[in-house]
């Protein structure tokens, strides 16, 4: 008998501890289901996004594998006929030259490509003398009339694996020859035009299958002026990088998926909170919750009375819903009544309409 009593006492103590420990937050069943659903959806979404963003991925990166620099230019000298004015045989660049004692113009073209690393380099080029005839328009613009091209030198850069290649070509230009060409063209056209004449080196280097063009020109007047000047531009330069596209594996940064980890913890927290710290609202608590919601929505349409008069002579009719009761009250022009009970809510969950013949009532059931 002593043992039985001790076991009963122990069971009672455990039950009391559980009651003291478990002070759950009371929620309606629908609210708990809603929170479970939200937590589950957030958990699923965060897991999917985390899986997508945490995996290593590949991306295309352009990597510089080589660099190139192309320089193209020219130098010239004017060879003079025998004369008693100049002692030197040639006049150097940048001077004013007399047409009367000009013999020919010696031009040295040069182009060079330099690479950071040795690669396959080839190329081709051409030197052309170009004669252009034009008329001057209303806005002093040159309107082309004709263009005549005279190939002078063609050449190739033999393909080889190297880090540099160059082109060096020299030629002599007789101004009188091309002035005569222009005169022949004008005779055929039946009129005189303005004339531009230039000698141009143009071509391309092929670097590992990629073409790099270049060009350079020298302008030489061929009119009948007593003196003339030769124009040339600054050294032409072209430089750049040769790139290759490579696929590289990239590990995502923590910052790119940290938000999804946080979202996962929030979702798990919602589920844990609902599971272990809440319970379904039942019985009297649930009834009062429903009555509170009902009064919050329809309380302004009701009248609180102290007691219900004698209704023994009237038939009672139960109404299915509070909305039906409110609509009925509007239709028969009677007030909606209730007796105040606990927490200022309708006593026994009942709400009435008293008509001459019937008592209509709605009773809130859990």
Image (tube, grey):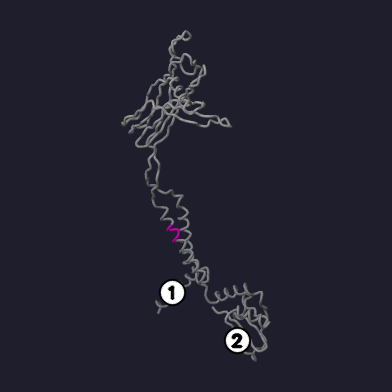
Q: Mainly helix, strand or loop, the magenta region?
A: helix
N-term-proximal mark, 1 vs 2: 1
Residue 202 seen: yes
Quarter of the image where one finds residue 204: top left
Asked if one can make out residue 23 in the rendered structure from this viewpoint, the answer is no
Residue closest to the eye, 328 or 171 = 171
At which x and y percent is residue 338? 64, 80
Residue 9 in the magenta stretch? The answer is: no
Residue 108, x across and y down, in percent: 40, 21
Quadrant where the image shows the C terminus: bottom right
Image x and y of residue 246, in percent: 37, 43
Give the image location of residue 361, x and y in percent.
61, 83
Numbered disc 2: secondary structure: strand
The magenta-colored residue range is 44-48
At a point 37% along the width and 32% down the height, the residue shown is: 205
Placement of the N terminus among the 4 image quadrants? bottom left
Q: Residues within 10 Å of mark 2 (few under 14, many from 20)?
A: few
Q: Cβ–Cβ below 8 Å for labels 1 and 2?
A: no
Q: Circle 2 is placed at which residue position?
A: 317
For label 1, count other residues whose C-alpha is less than 10 Å away and answer few (under 14), some (14-19) or many (20+).
few
Image height check: is 207 above or below 99?
Answer: below
Relative vertical location of residue 344 with respect to residue 91 in this rendering, above or below: below
Looking at the image, the residue that sits furthest to the top is 84
């Amino acid at each position: 008998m002593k043992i039985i009593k001790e076991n009963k006492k122990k069971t009672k103590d455990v039950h009391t501890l559980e009651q003291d420990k478990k002070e759950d937050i009371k929620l309606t069943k629908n609210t708990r289901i809603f929170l479970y659903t939200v937590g589950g959806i957030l958990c699923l979404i965060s897991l999917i996004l985390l899986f997508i963003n945490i995996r290593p991925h590949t991306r295309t990166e352009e990597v510089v594998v080589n660099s190139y620099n192309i320089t193209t230019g020219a130098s010239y000298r004017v060879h003079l006929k025998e004369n008693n004015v100049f002692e030197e045989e040639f006049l150097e660049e940048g001077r004013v030259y007399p047409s009367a004692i000009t013999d020919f113009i010696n031009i040295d073209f040069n182009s060079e490509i330099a690479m950071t690393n040795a690669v396959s380099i080839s190329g081709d080029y051409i030197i052309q003398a170009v004669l252009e005839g034009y008329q001057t328009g209303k806005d002093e613009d040159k309107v082309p009339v004709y263009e005549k091209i005279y190939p002078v030198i063609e050449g190739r850069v033999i393909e080889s694996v190297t880090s540099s290649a160059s082109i060096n070509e020299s030629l002599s230009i007789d101004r009188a020859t091309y002035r005569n060409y222009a005169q022949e063209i004008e005779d055929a056209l039946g009129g005189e035009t303005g004339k531009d004449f230039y000698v141009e080196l143009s071509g391309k280097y092929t670097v590992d299958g990629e073409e790099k063009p270049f060009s350079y020109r020298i302008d030489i007047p061929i009119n009948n002026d007593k003196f003339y000047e030769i124009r040339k531009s600054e050294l032409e330069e072209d430089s750049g990088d040769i790139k290759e596209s490579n696929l590289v594996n990239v590990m995502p940064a923590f910052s790119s998926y940290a938000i999804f980890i946080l979202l996962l913890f929030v979702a798990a927290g919602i589920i844990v909170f609902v599971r272990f710290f809440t319970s379904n609202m039942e019985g009297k608590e649930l009834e009062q919750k429903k009555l509170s919601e009902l009064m919050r929505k329809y309380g302004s349409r009701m009248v609180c009375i102290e007691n219900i008069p004698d209704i023994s002579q009237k038939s009672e009719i139960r109404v299915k819903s509070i909305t039906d009761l409110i609509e009925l009250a509007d239709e028969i022009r009677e007030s909606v009544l209730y007796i105040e009970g606990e927490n200022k809510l309708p006593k026994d969950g009942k709400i009435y309409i008293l008509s001459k013949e019937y008592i209509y009532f709605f009773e809130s059931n859990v």
